[in-house]
Image (tube, rainbow, N blue to C red):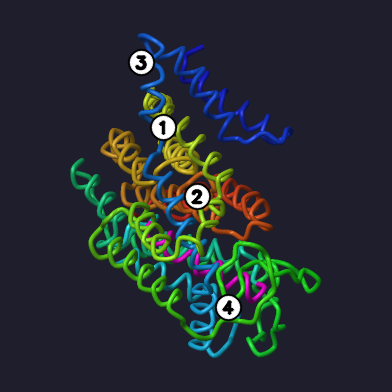
Amino acid sequence: MSYQVISILALVVAFIIATIRPINLGALSLVAAFVIGSIVVEGSPDDVADKIFENFPGSLFVILVGVTFLFAIARANGTVDWLVHMAMRGVGGRIALIPWIMFMVTGLLTAFGAVVPAAVAIIAPVGLGFAVRHRINPVLMGLSIINGASAGGFSPLAIFGVITNGVVADNNLPGSPLVLFLGSLVFNILLNVVVFVIFGGRELLGRVVEEEPAQEVAAGGGPGAAKAVTSGATGASFSESEHEPVTTLDLNRSLTLVALVGVAVGALGFQLDVGLLAVTAAVLLSLLAPQTYKGAVAQVAWPTVLLICGIVTYVNLMQDIGTVDFLGNQVATIGVPLLAALVICYIGAAVSAFASTTGILGALIPLAVPFLLAGHVGPIGLITALAISSSVVDSSPFSTSGALVAANAPEDRREYVYRRLMMWGFSMVVIAPPITWLLLVVPGWL
């Protein structure tokens, strides 16, 4: 049995253990990385450790910590509440429109070049603030934001689109940036309609802000789920307490708003790292009011950070030791081109659910080049199907976008959000490849 097969089995075992025992999957994944690394990596124990730490997602760690740190401050001093209030005025109080507004805003950001994780990192905390105040299921809000990011992510100006079109051009394959973009856009719009129906969107129809109770309720809760989840409007606090909706800006909120705008401009306009920007903004705000925000770091979603970073470390190690290439080589031995195309879409979806969509797109398209050049499968159709299959699974809490939504969910609903995102993300791993394959590859019209 090869070590690539062993690494896959180890991941399956870790999932089973985490499912039947209350053990953090990230911690189990770090153990698996240590065991597999010790088997595969040649050299001293220090070499093994260096190889494992080399695959630790430092950037993702900083994004998760930085964004949740900054928005802990923003929630505590009422800035998020104020943003919610202003946005609701903008839509005339129609609560059912809020998830679609978040979908549209995130999609526009990524379509014009914003990195998908950066756009989600900026919009998710605000969107989940809406969910808290207006009793919107946080899963509906989170998935709307993620789907919006994927919808715009394959425009000719977007990062995913640029990478995919570039790989196609480098390998002398026929491509269609327009088909790629429109295919992703339409698929994600239809997908979000399904999300809206499944996760309580129909219950929001006809509801307006004026009909809402004055007190706050837990995000996604029902009529009996009233419970305050943020701080008082008159002063920062990290304990749960009831308070009146925030409708004005004071000095702390104004400074926090400036910090949030600065992070957005830096990340979207200058392509600076959103995690480092968020940490910088949070530290500056803490320096201005150290006693007020001293509890902010404790609000970072540390269990989620361990879970996400642990499993991504292991999956990155799997990629490093050739597990993805191993799977690709197995596909190459399949004698039926249409079946091979479906398997490639499944590999893209499964691996991308745990790792970088950007990296998967760059790795799997070249693996498909030999039989694409043979002409048995339409390259435009397969590439579009692969792109969609690999991106819609970003809703998995082990992918950056899903991790950001889980980390920014209200603490009392975080486990609920995490489990629903995991169920939804893995349902996309199962469902998206055959649907895109049937629509885009089998007919042979692309």
Give coordinates of residue 241: x percent, y percent: 69, 69
Please say whether residue 120 is one of the residues in the magenta stretch: yes
Q: Residues within 10 Å of mark 2 (few under 14, many from 20)?
A: many
Q: Which circle's residue, 1 or 4, is located before the other in the chain?
A: 4
| Measured Cα–Cα span from mark 1 to mark 4 | 45 Å
Q: Which numbered disc flags the more N-terminal residue, 1 or 3?
A: 3
Q: Is residue 152 visible?
A: yes
- Depth check, mark 2 against mark 3: the one in front is 3
Task: Mark 4 or mark 3: name the one nearer the start of the chain.
Answer: 3
Mark linked to residue 47: 3
Q: Residues within 10 Å of mark 3 (few under 14, many from 20)?
A: some
* Residue type at the position of mark 1: Asn
Asked if residue 353 is positioned above or below residue 223 in the image, the reply reads above
Q: Which residues are magenta?
A: 118-135
Q: State which quadrant residue 109 falls in.
A: bottom left
Provide the residue designation for mark 4: 234
Q: CA distance from mark 4 to mark 3?
A: 53 Å
Give me the residue at 41% from left, 12% from top.
Answer: 45
Instruction: State the residue position of label 2.
Output: 393
